[in-house]
Amino acid sequence: MGQFDALVGDRGIKRVDELIVHARSKGGLLAKAIEMKGHEDGYSFDVYMKFVEQSIAARYPAQLNPLKGQVKLTELKEENGWLADNESWTSGFTHIAPYQEYQKDKKTASWLLNKDMAFVYRSMATHFNPLQIKIKEFDRTFNPNVDPRTIRT
């Protein structure tokens, strides 16, 4: 989400916070990302594509071939992931830790797939976004409307 997104505003951010707490309390494996932007694509799109790439690698058994029959995906376990402190997001340097080492309430933290995704996530949350991601076959979406007050559809 964009912190300055005029379409959802503060109400939308509060709803996402509520959703995260509710879903995580029931074992949901998800994370929130709020960028210093409006409604346009931001770094979260790049992180999402990296997440898709990592998720396929984590869940799809490499030795199986779907052309030869049904493939059972590998189950993700909460305790194998990493956690991010949602309260530290606005500090400019989000706190992340392996699930077992996380000291705060695990059910209110954002859940991250693995160490790689945890560091990518923290890079996105760091002020001035020092993040550079390149994924083969995907170009970054160009949006000339980078002023958070400007929304074009």
Image (cartoon, rainbow, N blue to C red):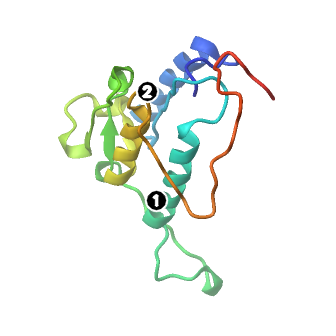
The residue shown at (41%, 41%) is 121
The residue shown at (65%, 21%) is 147
Mark 2 touches mark 1? (CB < 8 Å): no
> Within 10 angstroms of label 1, few (less than 14), some, or many (20 or more) residues?
some
Of 70 and 80, the residue lying toward us:
80
Is residue 32 rendered to the left or right of residue 78?
right
Amino acid type at mark 2: Val
Q: Secondary structure at mark 2?
A: helix
| Residue 112, percent from left and from top | 39, 45
Is residue 27 rendered to the left or right of residue 73?
left
Residue indicated by mark 2: 21
Of 84 and 91, the residue lying toward us:
91
Which of the 4 image quarters holds residue 152?
top right
| Residue 64, percent from left and from top | 51, 81
Residue situated furthest bottom in the rendering: 68
Q: Is residue 79 above or below residue 123?
A: below
Check the picture and name the quadrant holding the C terminus.
top right
Q: Is residue 85 above or below residue 141?
A: above
Residue indicated by mark 1: 54
Q: Is residue 10 above or below residue 119?
A: above
2 or 1: mark nearer the eye: 1
